[in-house]
Image: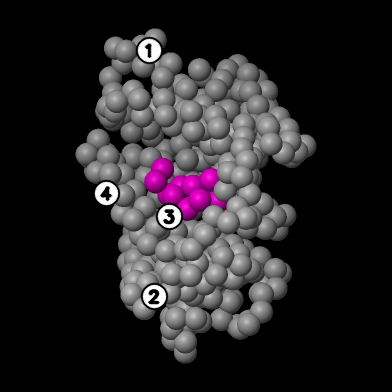
Amino acid sequence: MGNKKNANQENSVILVRPAGLAAVCLSFAEYAVAAFYPGCSSPQIVIKFTAAACILLLTIINCLNVRLATSIMNIFTAAKLLALLVVVVGGLVLLAKGQTQSFQNAFENTTAGIGPIGVAFYQGLWSYDGWNNLNYVTEELKKPEVTLPRAVMIAIPLVTCLYLLVNVSYFAAMTPSELLASGAVAVTWGDKVLGSWAWLISLSVALSTFGSSNGTFFSGGRLCYIAAREGHMPDILSMAHVRCLTPSPALIFTSAMSLVMILSGNFTTIVNFFSFIAWFFYGMTILGLLYLKIKKPELPRSYKVPIIIPIIVLMAAVYLVLAPIIDQPQIEFLYIVLFIFSGIIFYFPLVRFKCHPRFLQRVTLHLQLFLEVAPTAKNAN
């Protein structure tokens, strides 16, 4: 199980969390610049530079002050809920006026098949991926055994209801072809429903996606920090700033990986890439959970759920990983799988046998002095 755990952590740090951050920042950039290009698509170069600027700003904020980062999450979450409520209410008004044309023969000309449905789930489930962000910061929660389950049980049903109502509102205002052709769906909805006030939607969505980017960055940096502290990543990533008390090396590393992904891909490819890897890891994690539940039932457990739930999640993960490969095999999937399992190669010399070359120790020392960081002690609890 140790090899699997190390591979999961390493690839989550290098691939999954940076890919999620890159996708959310690209979404933020799409809406932030949409107001400057009315009636046409925004240039990709402008979107990518705006997304990169967003990541750099988040890096500065999260490296300087934890309280500031959490305050931004709270404020911008409120902005997100306000924007969603405006869209929902607008959609209900349109439905009351009888605009239901898009719901007639809604599934006509739909492409069916194992692969297309799996890829469609990639795009849809990515919207809900924030459900696991809180898991990475349990060490910084008060009473996590109470707070974490409560947050999940409240947030997921709330998000599900809001997202369903928002999509109903979109289809009430737009035809399926208009929705697919739009680069920023909420902005197109605002143009059709709010008229001259459409800029409010663009601003609200930009604020909400910025808050989501901050949440993803906050949790992703902590995952990198914990992985390094357990010896699965270079020691420098397990250190914290001596004055700000933030895991700045881990945050900078996450930022750098996200910037690489933004420059090399677009929103759709990054989301598909992220979803494939994420559900591969979710399946591995659930498989490990079931193994421990069967082989080591005596271990203490902070959270207890009916065993049918992890079994269902495992089946979903297997489908979401295998369906696109079976339906439309691509060489990129092979590269991703090989990269994932490459973590095992580094596990034996660097983690199992703790072979740390001298030059790495010198690099760590210089970086420690340059970044003004120091090692941290593990929380015994």
Split into 4 quadrants, where in the image is the C terminus? top left
Q: Amino acid at mark 4?
A: Ile
Find the distance from the CA under tag 1 to the CA under tag 4: 30 Å
Q: Are marks 3 and 4 in contact (CB under 8 Å)?
A: no
Q: Which mark is residue 154?
A: 4
Residue 279 visible to an observer of this rendering: yes
Question: Number of marks in the image?
Answer: 4
**SS of the residue at dot 1?**
helix
Horizontal side of 190 relative to 333 (left or right) equals left
Q: Nearer the viewer, residue 91 or 371?
A: 91
Find the distance from the CA under tag 3 to the CA under tag 1: 34 Å
Residue beneath the point at 70% across and 55% down: 265
Q: Position of residue 11 (x, y in %)?
A: 59, 35
The label nearer to you, 2 versus 1, is: 2
Magenta stretch: includes residue 106: no
Among the 4 quarters of the image, the one containing residue 55: bottom right
